[in-house]
Amino acid sequence: MKILPNITSLMDIGEPVCVTFDEHADGEPSDLLYCEITHKARHGESYSISAQGCPVGAYVLGVSDDTPHEYYLKSGRYIDMQTARRASGSLPRVVKPYRSIKIEPLSDNNGIFDVLILYLTPERAMRIIQAHSYASGARAVIDTLGAASVCVDCTALTIENGIGLSFGCKGSRKHSGYGDDEVPLGIGVEFVKMIEYGLGHIPETRD
């Protein structure tokens, strides 16, 4: 039987990715970027990592305390150092203690995870937001910088807020290769069942 069939059916390519911050198991360091690993898991690969290759990701995931303001300035993302410092200082971070991060396709997961990450067309992402609101009427608050999309918007912010919709970022689109017609979206584990239920009850987009 398909796991979370309503959520899974929204992805045209690959499957949802489970991210678990594991306090007990050790992982291996990886030279790949967090967003790269997540995208590979979309296509069926599984990882357990202790570190990854992106300096911004290292800061966001709590491995390093070095803010990425110099990297941001050198990359041309911001007009000056003051602005780069402001941007990097605004990045939420994962504060949950862990020894490794397990990143795997939903079909390989044992039912325990922190965040579910999907790559969706805008219309499919809209349906997630509608399903989120179905039972409560609550608005989903979208908070993004156009940077650090998969590690911040879809992971750290999702852990804080329960849902994180991103438009992607230069790094994740360049290194992961997900489509220009796709947006990454994170769902916190506490909202997954509610959204799965809502998807089964909201009307189709063009009914």
Image (cartoon, rainbow, N blue to C red):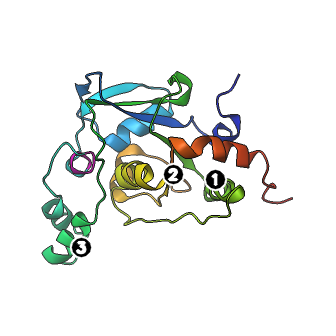
Residue 106 seen in the figure: yes
Q: How would you rate the neighbour count of disc 2 (Cα within 10 Å): few for under 14, some for 14-19, many for 20 or more?
A: many
Query: Whole-Å distance between the Cαs marked 1 and 3?
Result: 32 Å
Q: Which residue is mark 2?
A: 185
For the residue pair 162 and 11, the one nearer the viewer reads as 162
Who is closer to the viewer here, 149 or 116?
Answer: 116
**Residue at (55, 37) in percent of width and height:** 16
Residue 106 percent coordinates (x, y)? 54, 30
Question: Which quadrant holds residue 36?
Answer: top left
Magenta span dominant secondary structure: helix
Asked if the residues shown at circle 2 and circle 1 are in contact, with their CB atoms under 8 angstroms apart, the answer is yes
Q: Where's residue 138, x and y in %?
A: 62, 64
Q: Nearer the viewer, residue 170 or 106?
A: 106
Q: Position of residue 63 (x, y in %)?
A: 19, 42
Indicate the quadrant containing the N terminus: top left, top right, bottom left or bottom right. top right
Q: Point out residue 95 in the picture as x, y percentages from the top left corner.
A: 28, 47
> Which range of residues does the magenta coloring cover?
57-61
Q: Is residue 181 above or below residue 178?
A: below
Q: Residue at image x 29%, y 61%? A: 91
Q: Amino acid at mark 3?
A: Tyr
The residue where tag 1 is placed is 128
Give the secondary structure at mark 3.
loop
Of the numbered discs 2 and 1, the one sitting upstream in the chain is: 1
Residue on which disc 3 sits: 78
Of 77 and 17, nearer the camera is 17
Query: Can residue 10 be seen?
Result: no
The answer to whether residue 169 is left or right of residue 90 is: right
Dot placed on the residue nearer the N-terminal end, 1 or 3: 3
